[in-house]
Amino acid sequence: MTSPRSDRGSATSPLAPLGAETLLANRYVVERFLEYKNGANLYRAIDQATGFVVIVKEKEDEDSTSALPESEWAEKAWDNPWQNEFLILRSVSYPTVVKALDIFKASDRAYLVIEQLEGRDLAYLLRNGAAITVQQSLDWMIQLCQSIGQLHRRQILHLDLQPRYVVVTPDSQRVRLTGFHRAAILPCPTPTDSTPGYSPPEQFGYLSGKVDERSDIYALGALWHYLLTGNSPESYWPNEETRFNLPDISAFNEAIHPQIERIVRKMLAPDPDDRYSTVQELKAHLLALINNPQRRAGHCSDVGIIRAGNEDSLAVFDLTFTTQSTQSGLGLYVVADGMGGVNAGEIASALAVDAVTSHVQEALVNLNEGVDDPSQEIRAAMQQAIKNANARIYETGRHNQDLSGMGTTVTAALVFGQNVFIGHVGDSRAYLINREGIEKVSRDHSLVGRLVEIGQITLEEAAIHPQRNLIYRSLGTYPNVEVDLYQRPLKIGDWLLLCSDGLTGHVADEELQEVVINTSDPNLAARRLVNLANQRGGEDNITVVLVNLAEYT
């Protein structure tokens, strides 16, 4: 192997920095010198025309040419050493890619003006020990794929993806891309510049030396490897055995998801033919992880303090399918609160849970092989499952005098990908909870609930209303029943809570949220909620089912 080329440690002497208050192009006032990077001085400046903070890049004037097509800016950029970077950025209009604002010359120097990106670059965050979770890094990789994909669609390669050129917004939710000094238009010859640890073998002239979209994919892989392990790819560069063969992520994080390990390994394949062929292909594999999040479920059911028996029933099913190395599945969760004579309530709730789970599982067992948007199919299955439960309870009561008049509420939820589908009858409840708040999704089919809806009484009055246990819709009362259906999107970190009114009769919504978001384990959170209701009287049976879309760790 020949000695690799690198732009690190360039012998070019820095230009003498401009002083503060220097006026450039009768428009840009220099605030301060920032740094010398990649043969250029960088300044923070104020654009007097807009009042915005901008970044001014300065280098010595020199002859230059560009392979880019003519544009309205081409004449102004002509014979400017910044013209390649400037015209590339002007050809891309995407919110996550830095914008080029101006280009000009002054004396013997050439200038490029770009927007100031809010936040810190990844190099700064990593250098200062920022805690970056696996989930956060996955979200950022998807965003970077979107940005790089926009470039590749325009036949543009970035060719220098590394932490210093990825800027994270102050809220850590978004990343933006900068550092286009090395960007090139396809087809392009093997570049003379490369970055140890991040640039792929072909960018150093190894193998075929052919540089294309897969070269950026390798650099993305090196960047993600750094985020997941905390070890810079540059640290492996001195050793030829590890130079293009970074260690497995599982050597640093034994619990890393195997699919993440496999994706990074493919991104970092030394031979371009072994990598993902396009950023779109890579992004599809990343989205598959997001669209099939890990579900964690917990539950607890208790008779309470006053009642002699527990007439509540619940079900928790996790159905996972793994085919051709792709994992998908669904979670089915049901809470039912029975009512009736001796033992009739518990029989009604048990029948409801059995009928709902049986029908849904039978109807949706092949869901992962179905249509692109299964929403209608899922909603139909949930509705029919609850109608079947109603018919079964009604017929059982009609043919057994001891069970005559029995009934039950039911609240069933099916989590598929990042959506939840809810079927509901009665006054059990479904909530969505996260750190931003709590949403009561289901509507109580009770007299008191209706009075609250129309503003006749307050929530506080409803909690002590003498008819708070009267419901006007339940399973088993009539041969047919109307089912409320709901669909909500779920985000990673969201919680789904299903519960009987034995919980909500004692614990306010704000308290539900506080307990859930401050308890990481779903089973522990469920027990804490049940205990809280019992501490406040436990007048009814209490049943809780909690489901969390867990972050990748």
Image (tube, rainbow, N blue to C red):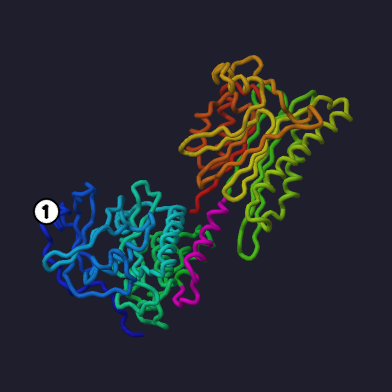
Q: Quadrant of residue 3?
A: bottom left
Q: Nearer the viewer, residue 188 or 217?
A: 188
Q: Is residue 284 left or right of residue 222?
A: right
Q: Quadrant of the N terminus?
A: bottom left
Q: Quadrant of residue 395?
A: top right
Magenta stretch, main secondary structure, is: helix
Q: Residue at 44% across / 61% down in the picture? A: 145
**Is any atom of residue 242 visible in this view?**
no
Residue found at the far bottom of this picture: 1
> Is residue 268 positioned above or below 522 on the image?
below
Q: Nearer the viewer, residue 79 or 551?
A: 79
Q: Residue at 66% across / 37% down in the picture? A: 485
The amino acid marked with disc number 1 is Ala
Q: Residue at 31% across / 56% down in the picture? A: 121
Q: How many marks?
A: 1
Q: Is residue 244 left or right of residue 289?
A: left
Indicate whether residue 293 is drawn in magenta: yes
Q: Is residue 334 left or right of residue 506?
A: right
Indicate whether residue 550 is drawn in magenta: no
Residue 355 % position (x, y): 77, 40
> Is residue 29 positioned above or below 478 on the image?
below
Residue assigned mark 1: 20
Residue 249 % position (x, y): 46, 64
**Is any atom of residue 175 visible in this view?**
yes
Q: Badge 1, how many Cα within 10 Å: few under 14, some, many 20+?
A: some
> Is residue 43 positioned above or below 201 on the image?
above
Q: Residue at 57% across / 16% down in the picture? A: 457
Q: Is residue 127 left or right of residue 305?
A: left
Residues in magenta? 269-294
> Is residue 61 positioned above or below 53 on the image?
below
Element class at badge 1: loop
Residue 389 % position (x, y): 77, 37
